[in-house]
Image (spheres, rainbow, N blue to C red):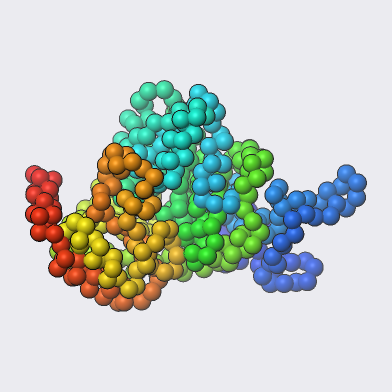
Amino acid sequence: MTISSRARQSGATCAVRAGIATDLEHGAVVPPLHLSSTFAFEGLGKPRTFDYTRSGNPTRAHLAETLAALEEGASAVVTSTGMSAVSLVLQLVKPGDLVVAAHDCYGGTQRLLRSLAARGLFDVRFADLTIDPAAALAEGPAPRLVWIETPSNPLLRITDIAAACSAAHARGALVAVDNTFLSPALQQPLLLGADVVVHSTTKYLNGHSDVVGGAVIAKDAALGTELAWWANCLGITGAPFDSYLTLRGVRTLYPRISQHLENASRVVDALCDHDAVAQVFYPGLPSHPGHATACAQQRGHGAMVSFELRGGQPALEAFVRELRCFTLAESLGGVESLVAHPATMTHASMDAAARAAAGISDTLLRISVGIEHPDDLVDDLVQALDVARSAADPATEAGDVILEAAVAS
């Protein structure tokens, strides 16, 4: 089945039917796993479709075709990790080119951008793209690449993809959008004007926290060919078994996302109602600055929720210690619920000044809401918040009140 014919199906059908009944040799309903590193030539000078797994593999091809169809792109490259997907996109820029990236993008992405820029491979500028992307992109030299992350990690800020793409294209720039937090089930950046979509397939696409991987989907066939060339050249393509597991996860993406959304709604309500919580960051809240934009470009608000906890370090430690249904761990998007402390975990590679500029405080927590029973998740959160409130540092609580009053005024 071709990508174009799959794109006419609903996303849910495309995800489930990926590679089904394509085995012509034995008629296997689920496509077999091809672990071979090399493939026999038909004869001298006559390679088959696949000759070496770094360059191409049937199992990885099934996953790539499916992801391209889900994002409605021309082609996809499956990479070994999410960060290798980021690295692959950066092969599109050269020394002297400018990359403009969201000021609050993932800490690992920031670390890579800053490190490669320090070596002179390109120039980088971090900008707030959430308020007025046209104004932010009009400043200074014209960029070659604009890097968008929406919702952002971890504060879930929203960037108007269509507006940012229009402004970037007016200056001759390519636009890459990290769509990891929502997946194509909830957002399709290519349809909003982006040139490239990036995923850490480790997260929602795989959905089971048992394999790492990445993907880059190109809107244009020529750009896709260039990306595939670089992936083979650098040797960062994904392994067959990892691709097999990820494709297995993709088949349940849509029902998983549905349950994630239902649970996230319950979790957000519980957080908003508890006085141990100073602020909740979730695009589904009407009070969120990006709510209207999120409603316009997304089909749901996702299952990532961040919040500020009152009471300082004592409350933070008590809260995390008391949780039973949320595991303290990095990553996100699995069926299990996780809680992370960005300042010491996902964004620890950023220095204090960079975290402050991005709005990442020491009392910020990020939750990846899983698909457990929502009553269990809410009960667990509430009891842990109750304990955190009791453990709160009185001096810190007073500071929280003063800060909130200052912000309100």
List x then y, in percent, for residue 109.
44, 43
Q: Quadrant of residue 388?
A: bottom left
List x then y, in percent, for residue 70.
54, 55
Q: Quadrant of residue 88?
A: top right
Residue at 37 percent of width and 53 percent of height: 345
- 372 displayed left or right of 184: left
Q: How many marks?
A: 0
List x then y, in percent, for residue 282.
29, 56
Task: Name the quadrant of the C terminus.
Answer: top left
Of the pair 274 and 292, the residue shown nearer to us: 274
Residue at 10 percent of width and 45 percent of height: 406
User: Is residue 269 at all visible to an observer of this figure?
Assistant: no
Q: Quadrant of residue 335?
A: bottom left
Above-or-below relation of 86 to 146: below
List x then y, in percent, for residue 30.
66, 70
User: Is residue 52 at all visible to an observer of this figure?
Assistant: yes
Of the pair 252 and 97, the residue shown nearer to us: 97
Of the pair 83 and 201, the residue shown nearer to us: 83
Task: Name the quadrant of the N terminus.
Answer: bottom right
Residue at 10 percent of width and 59 percent of height: 394
Residue at 80 percent of width and 68 percent of height: 25
- 303 displayed left or right of 195: left
